[in-house]
Amino acid sequence: MRLTRWNAFVLLSLSLAACHDSTGPQTMSAAFALNDIDGRPLPTYIAATPGLTPTILSGSLSLAESGEAEMTEHRTEWNGVDATYTVNYAYEIRNNEIIFSMLQPCPPNANCLAPPKGTISLGRIALEIGRLDNRPILYNYRPAPTL
C-alpha cells in the first residue's frame, strides 16, 4: 500500500509525538477518518444494545495545532433519519495518550457525556467514547486520505 506524502508525514508526526517525553502537552495538525468501531467495519452500530440503534456511516477527527479538535459523525438514526453530529473539544497529547476536554463546561443539571480518551499507536488513534456493561466502546481512526 502506497502512502501519500501527507499520510507519511502524519504517521511520522504522530509517532514522534507519541514517543516524545516532554514536560508540556503536545498538539499537531492532522485529520483522521473513522475506520471501525470495536473492530467492526463501517457502516455499523455503536454497540450491541437491545432495541433499535443508530448505524454509523462515517466519522472524522480533526486536530488543530491550536489544541482544538473536531469530531464529526454521520449516521442513520434508529428511525431512518440521516444526521450528522459535530462536537468540538480541546485536546493535548502526552506520551502516547490523547486527552480531550470540553471547550465549555457542562451546564448545571445537564446530562453531558464525558469527553473521549484515547491512545496513539503507529499513526492511528483509538478513542474510548463510552462504555457498555463496563466494556469500552472503541472508535478506531486512521490517517485521512488526502486529495
Image (spheres, rainbow, N blue to C red):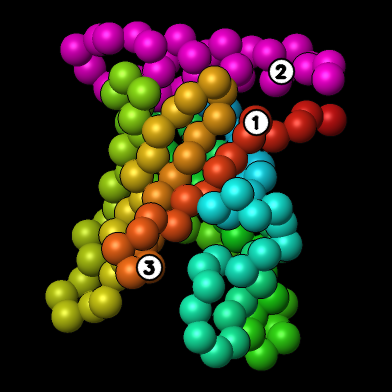
Q: Where is residue 96 in the image (x, y as percent from the top left)?
A: 36, 23
Q: Is residue 82 above or below residue 142?
A: below
Question: Mark 1 Cα within 10 Å, few/some/many (few <14, many 20+)?
Answer: many
Q: Mark 2 points at which residue?
A: 6
Of the image marks 3 and 2, the number of the one nearer the N terminus: 2
Residue located at (58% from left, 80% from top): 53
Secondary structure of the residue carrying numbered label 3: strand
Q: What residue type is labelled 1?
A: Pro
CB under 8 Å between discs 1 and 2: yes
Q: Name the residue under label 3.
A: 132
Residue located at (60% from left, 49% from top): 39
Residue located at (21% from left, 71% from top): 107
Q: Describe residue 130's horizontal placement relative to residue 87 as left or right.
A: left
Q: In this view, does 53 lie above or below 107?
A: below
- For the view shown, which residue lies furthest in the left direction? 108
Is residue 8 one of those drawn in magenta?
Answer: yes
Q: Which amino acid does label 3 sit on?
A: Leu
Q: Mark 1 points at which residue?
A: 143
Q: Which amino acid does label 2 sit on?
A: Trp
Between label 1 and label 2, give the one nearer the viewer: 1
Is residue 54 one of those drawn in magenta?
Answer: no
Q: Which region is colored magenta?
A: 1-28
The part of the image, by quadrant, that contains residue 146 is: top right
Q: Position of residue 78 (x, y in %)?
A: 63, 85
Question: Mark 3 Cα within 10 Å, few/some/many (few <14, many 20+)?
Answer: few
Label 3 and label 2: CA atoms lie apart by 36 Å
Secondary structure of the residue carrying numbered label 2: helix
Q: Describe residue 19's horizontal placement relative to residue 45 as left or right.
A: left
Secondary structure of the residue carrying numbered label 1: strand
